[in-house]
Amino acid sequence: MQANDVRILRNAAIPTGAVGVIAALVSWMLAGYKGALGAGIGILVVMLFFTISLVAVTYAGRISPAMMAAAALTTYIVKIVGLGLLAASFADTTLWAPAALGWAVIAGTLVWTMAEAIGFMKSKRTILEGGPESLPEWARKAAQAKGAQYD
């Protein structure tokens, strides 16, 4: 992984972990240790799924932009199917509070997605094939004014 990718991963994982701690504390107050366990498992599932996606998409992006899109779509489908299988497998569990797990997954997903989007916007990564010469003149000047550097 490149330094930008590690930075994006870190900047998404830290706030998501913080939300997990808050979710576990709130769930513990509302549903006891089973609520805290459910919230903790939910946040761990979110962090694991999104980390795998980021690593896969980053690796595929080194190969080609088309592979990057395919990897993103594939990991999305795998995450949805995996989350569905996880929910179906543990639908009747009494080990943790399923509602706490569900709310933690929702909160973790929202926080991770926002943090990752912010990280990508701040990364100043070139996402166009063909380089700066394929940009219109006005776009090239605007990008350079904001600090874009072309190798």
Image: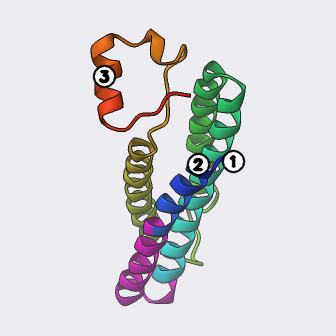
Residue at x 56%, y 28% (from the top left corner): 151
Asked which quadrant contains residue 46, the reply is bottom right
Are the residues tagged 1 and 2 within 8 Å (C-beta)?
yes
Q: Mark 3 points at which residue?
A: 141
* Colouring method of the image: rainbow
Instruction: Compute the Cα span from label 1 to label 3.
Output: 30 Å
Q: In this view, does 35 lie above or below 125?
A: below
Residue 32 x, y percent position in the rendering: 44, 89
Amino acid found under the numbered disc labelled 3? Lys
- Answer whether residue 4 is magenta in the image: no
Q: Mark 2 points at which residue?
A: 5
Q: Most prominent secondary structure in the magenta stretch? A: helix
Q: Name the residue under label 1.
A: 1
Residue in the foreground of this view, choosing between 129 and 20: 129
Instruction: Compute the Cα span from label 1 to label 2.
Output: 6 Å
Which region of the structure is painted magenta?
A: 15-34
Asked which quadrant contains residue 129, the reply is top right
